[in-house]
Each structure stands twice: as C-alpha cells, then as structure tokens.
C-alpha cells in the first residue's frame, strides 16, 4: 500500500509553491493526494471542477499524485483514506499561527492523524494564490510563479488578453 499523504487546501489556483511541496513530499511518501476543500469560508475564483481539472492536467504524468475534492471536515475525509498524515506547506512566520491552530484542532478531532509541515522553497516563499490572483487581475505578470496553464486560466477568468510569446519582426 505504501505511505500516503493528504495535501489539503483551496488550490485557487495551484501555484509552483504547491507543486514544489508535492514534488518534495514524493521523496518521503509513495503517494500524495491533493485534496481540494469545497466549503471553505473563502469565495473561490475557480470552481472545484476547474481546480481539479488544472491539477489533474498538471500531474497527468505522475501516477503517484492524485487529485480529489472533499466537503466537510478534513479529518473525516482523511479517515476515509488510508493516510495518517496531513501535509501542509509553511511559508514565512505569518503562516505559523494559523497552521498551528489548524493542526492542533485537527489533532484534537482525530488523535490518529498528524500534520507534517514542509518549508516552502526560498523561490516561492512569497507566492500565495491570493496575491497571484490580485497581480494577474491588475495586469502584472506571474510567469515562473504558476504553470503556464494556470496563468492562461487566470487571464481567461479576468478576461485579459492571452499574449503569445512575442515574435520578433523587422516591421515593428
Ligand atoms: O489553502 P488553504 O485555504 O489555506 O486551506 C485550508 C484548508 C482547506 C486546509 C482548511 O480550511 C480545511 O481543512 N478546511 C476543511 C474544513 C475543516 O476541516 N475545518 C477545520 C480545520 S481546523
């Protein structure tokens, strides 16, 4: 069966910060399940289906990465799988309080589960789905911070022009 980690979150949308955590977790776990929460307090930009589709496309060549969605309590979802570990990425110190709170609550709800934190790589510690959305909406570039597919989907959502890689022409 092997070791399985559940990586929960909103993934609205998935960024290279998330992908980096998944890739590094695969060095420790045999399987990582990206679990998209359906009912967070946040009003998502992308529907659960859209988020699932993006994640599945990005990991189509990685058979040990699965994408799923869940409603209700995370611990109840995890209990239905054979995973014992909830995986979360930690960026700067500001994430700590929220994450500590959530991990403690989850542990109090189910003492058989543990939360494992991985530090985000230095290249992505400032990347969040929230700022990616804001920057794109306001016309800023997010190349290198999210996969091209995600950058395109964001532009479609915000009805921004999707620019092809610039062709050099002697006429302009
Ligand atoms: O990417 P996010 O938005 O930081 O992820 C937060 C998430 C989805 C992991 C958290 O809100 C969650 O687990 N929601 C499911 C409902 C639940 O179990 N709430 C109690 C957690 S203390």
Image (tube, rainbow, N blue to C red):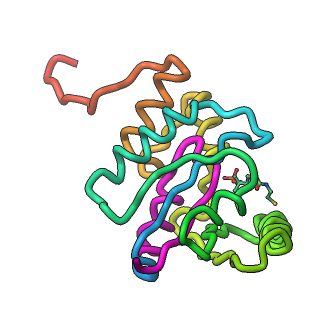
Residue at position x 76%, y 65% in the image:
95
**Magenta region: which residues?**
1-26
At a point 50% along the width and 33% down the height, the residue shown is 49
Give ligand 1's quarter of the image: bottom right
Q: Is residue 95 above or below residue 111?
A: above
**Above or below, comparing residue 38 to residue 76 in the picture:** above
Q: Residue at horizontal 30%, vertical 51%?
A: 60
Residue 13: x, y in percent?
55, 42
Question: Is 25 contained in the magenta span?
Answer: yes
The N terminus - image quarter: bottom left
Question: In x, y percent, where is residue 167?
Answer: 20, 29
Residue drawn at x 72%, y 63% as measured from the top left: 75
> Would you identify the image quadrant in which residue 115 lies?
bottom right
* Residue 27 or residue 80, whichever sits in front: 80
Front residue of 104/11: it is 104
Q: Is residue 33 rendered to the left or right of residue 62?
A: right
**Quadrant of residue 130 within the rendered picture:** top right
Q: Position of residue 36 (x, y in %)?
A: 59, 48
Answer with left or right where residue 111 lies relative to residue 70. right
* Left or right position of 62 against 2: left
Position of residue 111 measured from the top left corner of the image (x, y, whole percent): 78, 79
Which quadrant of the rendered structure holds the C terminus?
Answer: top left
Furthest-front residue in this view: 80
| Number of marks in the rendered image | 0
Q: Is residue 15 magenta?
A: yes
């Amino acid at each position: 069966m092997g070791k399985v980690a559940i990586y929960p979150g909103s993934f609205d949308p998935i960024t290279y910060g998330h992908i980096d955590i998944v890739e590094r977790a695969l060095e420790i776990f045999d399987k990582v399940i990206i679990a998209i929460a359906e009912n967070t307090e946040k009003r998502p930009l992308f529907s659960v289906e859209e988020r699932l589709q993006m994640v599945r496309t990005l990991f189509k060549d990685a058979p040990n990465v699965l994408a799923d969605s869940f409603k209700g309590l995370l611990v109840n979802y995890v209990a239905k799988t054979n995973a014992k570990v909830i995986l979360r990425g930690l960026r700067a110190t500001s994430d700590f309080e929220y994450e500590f709170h959530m991990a403690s609550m989850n542990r109090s709800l189910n003492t058989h589960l543990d939360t494992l934190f991985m530090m985000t790589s230095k290249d992505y510690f400032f990347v969040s789905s929230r700022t990616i959305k804001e920057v794109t909406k306001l016309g800023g570039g997010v190349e290198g911070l999210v996969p091209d597919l995600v950058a395109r989907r964001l532009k479609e959502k915000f009805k921004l022009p999707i620019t092809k890689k610039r062709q050099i022409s002697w006429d302009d």
